[in-house]
Image: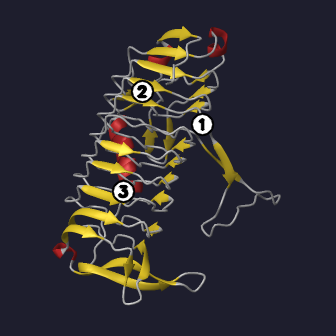
Amino acid sequence: MKKSLTAIAAALFIAALAIPVFSGCSARVGYILKTDGEGNSYYSVSLDGSKLAMGGEVVIPATYGEQNLPVKEIEASAFSNTSVTKVTIPASIEKIGDAAFAYNKALREVVFEEGIKIDAVSWGLFGNCPNLKSVAVPDSVTTIDGLAFYGCGGLENIDLPAGLKYINTGAFNGCTSLKSVELPGGLVSIGGMAFYGCTSLKSVILPDSMHSVTSPKLDGNGNEVKDENGNTETVTTPALGAISFFNCTSLELAVLGSGITAIEAGTFGNCIALRDIYLPSSLLEVGGMFASGDTLYGHAFFNVKNLTVHYAGTEEEWGAVKIDDSYYTYGDAASDNKGLIEAAKIFGDSYKRQ
């Protein structure tokens, strides 16, 4: 059977990364007594009974029990597959488990109380919450983990904190109502498929702070992997992951920061409305087709036409950028970087940041 590049990429995402549907039992909020590393007792929020019976607004208390012990955690998948419409999370919460509110079709509002100290929006936290309209991410958050807002088709506004460093794989995949996103100045990287299929997104301005990061390679136990000579192996995370803005069909303007050196495969693939892109003189290469198992990734500018490139460097410097000029066909699909190669060029032109 013939497959389009879009379908191929989507199939990979669903198969490899989709949030699992958690089963559980809960009709009321429950509390688990725990002890931290220093011997201090606290409570973690869970649910008791049948999840089908849990609905309406939930206000998680800052303390619980006769001794008024602090409530510091929300368990993984605790409120997934319920009918909760609004949740208020107190400043006492320090950790929220993976997919804690995933697959909640009724959820419309999330309130993080001022002063909360969580450092991440955890993996799949609000995945497949289609009626969630707006979220103000707490100031303490430095990481938005993979699939955090995956499939939130109704999400229109996301307020990101100034200290945010990482947006991980598929974080906003399928947020089809998201028209704009203001990325903070200290952002380091955006993971693969992070904004895949955000079909209402009209512009994206990537800060100069974004850059690739090389770190030790770790095994499944968190230990550094050594090569045959005893040297620590490394892995490099690109500033902008593959397919990160693939199929953003309303995207008209893209601005890449001065720390970005590579545009990976599929990054702006099928961005059919893209008309202007500002590229830094730091750019060294633009990726083409590659395969991962049975999955094919299209070129960085697959199916992009009528593009104008605003390049910060000289024409000579542009000539030194390594652009994959291959042409690839697979069934009834074809992929290349022709849209970038043949685009109108304006040299020495940088985006005027406000």
Query: Which badge, 3 or 1, comes first in the chain's sequence?
Result: 3
Tag count in the figure? Answer: 3
Asked whether the beta carbons under mark 3 and mark 1 sit within 8 Å of each other, the answer is: no
The span from disc 3 to disc 1 (Cα, nearest Å) is 30 Å
Is 162 left, or right, of 126 in this rendering?
A: right
Q: Where does the N terminus fall, quadrant-wise?
A: top left
- Residue type highlighted by circle 1: Ser
**Is residue 26 in view from this perspective?**
no
Residue position for label 2: 302
Seen from the viewer's position, the closer of residues 106 and 110 is 110
Q: Identify the element where label 2 is drawn.
A: loop
Residue position for label 3: 18
- Dot 1, crowdedness within 10 Å: few (<14), some or many (≥20)? some
Q: State the residue at coordinates (68%, 66%).
A: 223
Q: Tell me residue 219's x, y (percent).
A: 63, 64
- Dot 3, crowdedness within 10 Å: few (<14), some or many (≥20)? some
Query: Which badge, 2 or 3, comes first in the chain's sequence?
Result: 3
- Residue type highlighted by circle 3: Ala
Is 297 left, or right, of 23 in this rendering?
A: right
311 vs 15: above or below:
above
The span from disc 2 to disc 1 (Cα, nearest Å) is 26 Å
Residue position for label 1: 209
Seen from the viewer's position, the closer of residues 281 and 118 is 118
